[in-house]
Image: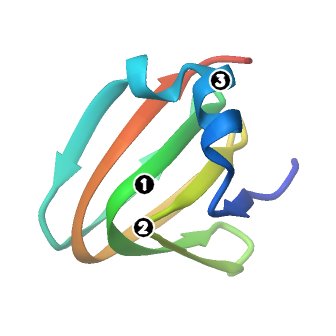
Amino acid sequence: MSDVIIEKNPSQDKIQKMGIKKWSIWTKEASEFPWFYDEEEHCYFLEGEVEVLNEAGKSFYIQKGDLVTFPQGMSCIWKIKKAVKKHYYFGKL
């Protein structure tokens, strides 16, 4: 299984070309919960800070301005440190 891919501060041109602003929005308060990705997820963080810990014990720190790809088949724990607001899209791009 591949790792989480985090791109810091993608260009506005890339955001526009990917159609990110048309993706759905998800919000969540500070919390902790398990999650499983039955599909690949792409998301762009508008607000918040999150630590995601995968089943191998590897930790990923995600924050405002990050463009993230979560691989299909990954089990993890989401630890939301500051409330999250993100655009998201499930499936291959």
**Mark 1: which amino acid?**
Phe
Label number found at residue 64: 2
- Which is more toward the observer, 20 or 50? 20
Packing grade of label 3 (10 A; few <14, some 14-19, many >=20) is few
Residue 84 image-quadrant placement: bottom left
- Which is more toward the observer, 41 or 7? 7
Q: Indicate left or right for 79 with 52 as reference.
A: left
Give the residue drawn at x 87%, y 50%. 2
Give the residue drawn at x 50%, y 24%. 89
Do the numbered discs 3 and 2 sit on residues whose CB atoms are within 8 Å? no
- Which is more toward the observer, 55 or 83? 83
- x, y percent for residue 74: 66, 47
Q: Secondary structure at mark 3?
A: helix
On screen, residue 35 above or below 33: above
The first of marks 2 and 1 along the sequence is: 1
Do the numbered discs 1 and 3 sit on residues whose CB atoms are within 8 Å? no
- x, y percent for residue 83: 19, 68
Question: Which residue corresponds to mark 1?
Answer: 45
Residue placed farthest to the left in the image?
Answer: 29
Question: Which residue corresponds to mark 3?
Answer: 18
Residue 3 image-quadrant placement: bottom right
Viewer-nearest of discs 1 and 3 = 3
Give the residue drawn at x 59%, y 27%. 16
Q: Secondary structure at mark 1?
A: strand
On screen, residue 59 above or below 23: below
- x, y percent for residue 48: 30, 69
Give the residue drawn at x 67%, y 45%. 69
**Mark 2: which amino acid?**
Lys
On screen, residue 59 above or below 44: below
